[in-house]
Image: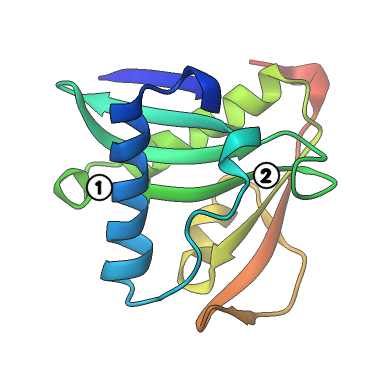
Amino acid sequence: MEWVLKSFEELSALELHDILRARVDVFVVEQDCAYHEVDGYDTESWHLQLKIDGKLAAYARLMKAGTKYNKASIGRIIVIEEFRNRQIGRALVEKSIDVMKDWGTGEIMLQGQTYLRTFYGSFGFEEISAEYLDDGIPHVDMLLTIDTKEKS
């Protein structure tokens, strides 16, 4: 297992291909949701990848405050199908939070699919919006407040 965190400019063409393919496979094909997956924020984001035996197993897009929202955010959280049911999603969110703690981030937001609210809540994220539809899928905005004095 290898964690890889890169800016857009640091990604190889193959890494970018694998990330975009995985995101389309999960969000567009698997969830049957036609939307603009390539939304213009990838170039300003950090890309956290978990590779197992050289293969992309999980991914999250991390944004510093001011990139898209006034708070830092985690998005595009995915675990590739063949790697599911191994607690990799939990490890991915934990690693994302740790990276953002290292940035000195005090608050992290995410737009979670409603069925995952308990999962995200287990990390301390709290709901800050009513449920809403985003591209036809129920979501809720969630916020994690970090005590920046307790950096890990």
**Which residue was labeled with disc 2?**
73
**Which residue was labeled with disc 1?**
80
Position in image of residue 142 (x %, y %)? 68, 59
Vertical relation: 33 (above or below) 62? below
Q: Is residue 133 left or right of residue 18?
A: right
Q: Does the rendering let one see residue 79?
A: no
Q: Report the colour scheme.
A: rainbow
SS of the residue under disc 1:
loop
The answer to which of 77 and 147 lies nearer the viewer is: 77
Kindly give the residue lying farthest to the front in the view shown: 13
Q: Name the image quarter holding the C terminus.
A: top right
Position in image of residue 137 (x %, y %)? 49, 79
Position in image of residue 38 (x %, y %)? 50, 54
Question: Residue at 30% of width from left, 42% of height from top?
Answer: 87
Question: Residue at 41% of width from left, 41% of height from top?
Answer: 90
How many numbered tags mark residues here?
A: 2
Question: Residue at 14% of width from left, 21% of height from top?
Answer: 53
Q: Name the image quarter holding the N terminus.
A: top left
Q: Is residue 95 left or right of residue 99?
A: left
SS of the residue under disc 2:
strand
Q: Which mark is residue 97?
A: none
